[in-house]
Amino acid sequence: MASYKFNNSHSFGVTLYYTARSLIRSSQDRTFISANHEVITNEEKSIKHNGLLAILGYHWVINKEWSLGVSARPPALNISGEGDYYLAVTDTNNLPSKVTHYKNTGATTYIPPRYAIGVGWKPSDRFTLSLDTSYTSAFQYEDMDNSDASDFIQYVDTLNMAVGAEYKFLEPKFDLRLGFFTNN
C-alpha cells in the first residue's frame, strides 16, 4: 500500500493485493436406465491461479465536516494459471468407458472491475456518518483454455450501497459503530 498526500485536502493511494485461487471440484453421477443398464459419470476439475489486483483511491476533504472518496479496481493482472480435468463416462451397455483427461491446461480467474464513491459527514469530533455506492461491471470468461474442460463464468452489473455511523463515547472510552449494506 502506498499513499501520497498532496496537501491537507487531497490524497491519493494505491493498494496491491496478491490473489490466489485454488478450485477442486469432484462429482459422480449414476443414472439407472433399466435394471441391467446404467451410466456412471465421474468428473474431477482442479484450477490453481495467481494474480495481482490493484485498487486506486482518491480522498478529498472538502471542509471540516464533509469529505469525498472515489476508488477504482481494474481487472486483476494474471500471473499464472493451470488446471487439470478428468471425465470418465461408463455405459454398462457400451463398454469400454469414454475417458477425457487434460493435464496442465491453461486456466484463468478474472476479478471484474469495480468503481466506488463515498461521502463522509463529521459534524463533531465524536460522530461520523458515511454513505457509499459501489458498482461492479458485467464480465464473462471461460476459466480454462480447453473448451471441453472449461466453465463459463458470468458476472452481471451489480450496484451495492452502504451506510455507516460511528459514535465515540468519552466514558467508558470506546467507539460504537453501526452499518447497513446491500449484498447484491
Image (tube, grey):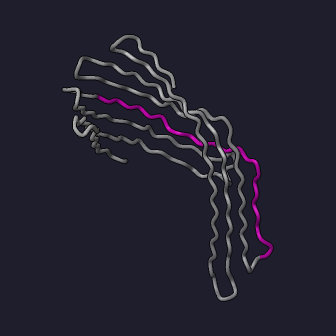
Examine the image and state in which quarter residue 106 appears. Answer: top right
Examine the image and state in which quarter residue 79 appears. Answer: top right
Residue 120: x and y in percent read 27, 28
Q: Residue furthest bottom?
A: 35
Assess whether residue 112 is covered by the magenta stretch: yes
**Highlighted magenta segment, given as a residue range:** 95-119
Our reading of the magenta stretch's main secondary structure is strand
Examine the image and state in which quarter residue 181 appears. Answer: top left
Q: Is residue 119 left or right of residue 87?
A: left
Residue 50: x and y in percent read 64, 39
Q: Nearer the viewer, residue 133 or 173?
A: 173
Residue 100: x and y in percent read 75, 60
Q: Nearer the viewer, residue 126 or 34?
A: 126
Looking at the image, how many numbered discs can be counted on the residues? 0
In the image, residue 2 above or below residue 116: above
In the image, residue 55 above or below residue 138: above
Q: Is residue 128 left or right of residue 148?
A: left
Residue 67: x and y in percent read 28, 23
Identified at 41% across, 27% down, the residue is: 71
Identified at 37% across, 26% down, the residue is: 70
Assess whether residue 138 is covered by the magenta stretch: no
Identified at 24% across, 40% down, the residue is: 172
